[in-house]
Amino acid sequence: MKKVFTLLTIVCFVASISLFSSCTKSQEDLIVGTWKCTTATCTPYTQLINIYLDFTMVFNADKSMSATMMGRTENGTYTIEGDKLTTDFAGKTTPMDIKKLDNKKLSVSFVNESRDDEGNPITYVYELDFDRQ
């Protein structure tokens, strides 16, 4: 009887682990949906970037996506590898670091290289936070 109870306990434990592990969503599953930007910062400019507050991204399960800002929508694709999200709009790719991704929040950061009026290189670091819509 003691062996049967021990075996039954082990079977129940393994079954509960399988049940809980199957409830965990992957990042590919979590990102699917509509996300609206709630905060945006840019270094070396540490203020809030208001233009991004009108920014919405839609990620689809088939890896297609759209981004809408100031009434203009562009369609593209995306990939996720580990904590890296890469968007591609007409061949212009933007790799981003995923800082947080769950059922309600998405936070990313990315770097943009540019030049000032005198031609000197400038590195901008953007950090964007999104809420699921």
Image (tube, grey):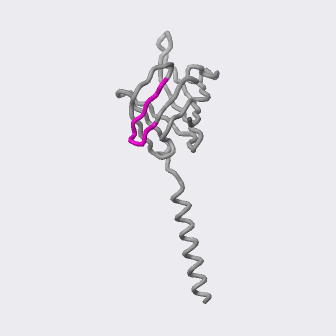
What count of labels does the image hold? 0
Report the front residue among 80 and 119.
Answer: 80
Q: Residue furthest front?
A: 133
From the image, give the main secondary structure of the stretch colored magenta.
strand
Rendered-image quadrant of the N terminus = bottom right
Q: Residue furthest left?
A: 91
Residue 33 at x, y = what percent? 49, 38
Is 118 covered by the magenta stretch? no
Q: Residue furthest right?
A: 47
Report the front residue among 2 and 112.
Answer: 2
Residue depicted at 54% across the width and 70% down the height = 14
The answer to whether residue 8 is above or below residue 108 is: below
Q: Residue furthest bottom?
A: 1
Residue 46 at x, y = what percent? 63, 23
The answer to whether residue 17 is above or below residue 133 is: below
Is 65 covered by the magenta stretch? yes
Left or right, 123 with respect to 89, comes to: right
Residue depicted at 55% across the width and 27% down the height = 125
Residue 108 at x, y = what percent? 54, 35
Rendered-image quadrant of the C terminus = top right
Q: Quadrant of residue 39?
A: top right
Residue 65 at x, y = what percent? 42, 34
Query: What is the span of residues highlighted in magenta in the rendered image?
Result: 59-68
Residue depicted at 54% across the width and 63% down the height = 19
